[in-house]
Image (spheres, rainbow, N blue to C red):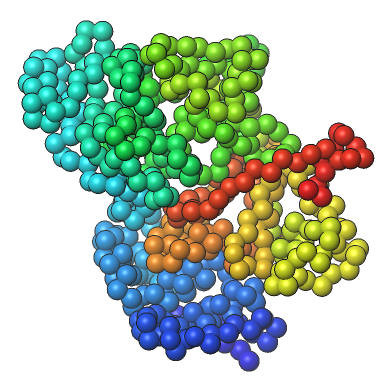
Amino acid sequence: MTLVLNHRINLPEIDTSQAPCINFTKATALADVHPTVDLDLLRQLADGVRGDQIGSEDATRALCQVFEDTFTFEVLHGQLNADLKAKVSAFLSGTPAETIAAQGFDPTRAPLSLHRHLFGGRVPDAHKKHHLFGARAYAKVAQTIDAVENRPVVFEDCEQTKIMEVYAGVPFLNWQQNVHTRPVLTFVPSTVLGLQNLIKAYPQKRIRCSGYRHTRSGLFAEDGEILVSFVSLHHVASVLPEMISMFTSQINEAEVSGELRSIQTFPPRAGEAVTQRPLPVDVTSDEITTGRIIGSMCHGSGFAHKSINDYIRSLEYVDVKGEVQTITDPGELHAALGCFGLLGIITHVTYEVKKMTFAVMQPRKVKTMLAIPPFDTSQVPEALHVETSPEELQEAIIEFERRAEQDHYTEWSWFSYQSDVLVNTWSTVSDSEGQQDYTTPTQTFLQWIASWQSQLLATGNMAVLSPLTTDPDDLEIKTKLPNALHFRRGRHYARARNMELELPIPSSPTDKNKPDWTT
């Protein structure tokens, strides 16, 4: 039997004769609860995905079409501006993503409520940056803070003319939406002196820095405590940080200026050519501040190299007494690198960067049992078990160990109920020939619409990663190292309420110099 996805557009024919059976035994009940969801198209899409017969673009388009007649879609589509609304409609009508991207695509114009709302309550318009008023208006500003809004004055300069930005009673909601707190005060310092004055002003209060993305633990200021943010609340609520890196012309200098919001570069050693120099490792999530990365336990990107914190050569922080401390001794840095945030509030960090290298990526979708092969196949759940010969299993074990031990970057992504794993491990080369900018405008549009689609369906990030869809077997992407580290970044708009575990890999009982992968 052949099924065709033909809801408003014609997609490739899907042969389901060899595909696993999709059982919609509760379709009638689902249709009663969600009468506007196109269950026929959803059934066809599921067959095509399970049979590896539909590409990422077609799958993203069809999944949006499944919900196109729902009230939720109407609301989310209505929140887009006229240009984005027209582009989404054109895409759903069958216009290729490449054609749409060629007309120009700016994801920064998407309404921010679709992506994040860091603080649980709207930041009141009356909360202005008081230091922008200048010294002449100081008396009036101080009176407004103390008498009207009952907020404290913390100076950020020696002349006592610059007042630290502060908010009273603004609730905090982290990105994963699993932490809800109401700090009594939220300060946004822009100078080290201001941060020192703040800590000295509240010796009996617990002061915590906010984490903006990756953290799911309770590293936040609790109710009634003091929260410190190095990013303006207005800035967080109005600008996509990742988009700043993509569209540098949109940086608001008033938002990123200040002693605590700058980057300094040092020239290479004598005799070295001037070239691009990135960090050789990074967390894959976007929109994370440097302090957030190194403030808590931070991983690297593969077994073959160290963590981000190992590339730090100097660290400056303000301790619990409000004093500035600096660490440059390698031994002391190594002792604290597991969690620099325990030292105090980090203000400056110096990284050692490396020469630009180029990643050669060959992402592949592999059956779960063979992607991370077990030594005992009887432990594999029936739903994930595949028939394989001892020789094939041994080959899979050797390939897994090679990737884990030797590749620069290693990642195996698996989602619940999926029979396949996206294997994305790669190494780097110094030769730039054949490298491309990744992602392309077309890929950027597809990743944006997949993340926008995730507002309709929580599994939207799976479409972006593409374990559900089919990439060509010979797909190879050669690109600059930073681009590869943030592979298919559109998934990071979807909230990840997962749990991370760090499993230590002991040495092999037969060879102390090799890891024991049987763990």
> Looking at the image, which residue sits at the far top?
159
Question: Number of callouts in the render?
Answer: 0
Residue toward you, 109 or 151: 151
Q: In this view, does 91 lie to the left or right of 384?
A: left
Q: State the image quarter where residue 4 is shown.
A: bottom right
Residue drawn 53% across and 87% down?
25
Where is residue 308 drawn, in percent x and y?
A: 60, 31
State the image coordinates of residue 353 (x, y, percent, origin top left).
60, 25
Q: Where is residue 27 in the image (x, y as percent from the top left)?
A: 47, 86
What residue sits 63% from the left and 26% below the top?
310
Whether residue 230 appears in this view of the structure is: no
Q: Which residue is drawn at 90% across and 37% down?
A: 511
Q: Is residue 320 above or below residue 76?
A: above
**Can the viewer see residue 24 in this picture?**
yes
Please identify the quarter of the rendering in which residue 357 is found. top right
Quadrant where the image shows the N terminus: bottom right
Q: Residue at left 64%, top 40%?
A: 301
Where is residue 93 shown, x and y percent of the image? 39, 75
Q: Decide which of 112, 275 is in the foreground and name it.
A: 112
| Left-right relation of 95 to 410 | left
Q: Does 240 sit above or below residue 207?
A: below
- Looking at the image, the residue that sits furthest to the bottom is 1
Q: Is residue 292 above or below residue 417?
A: above
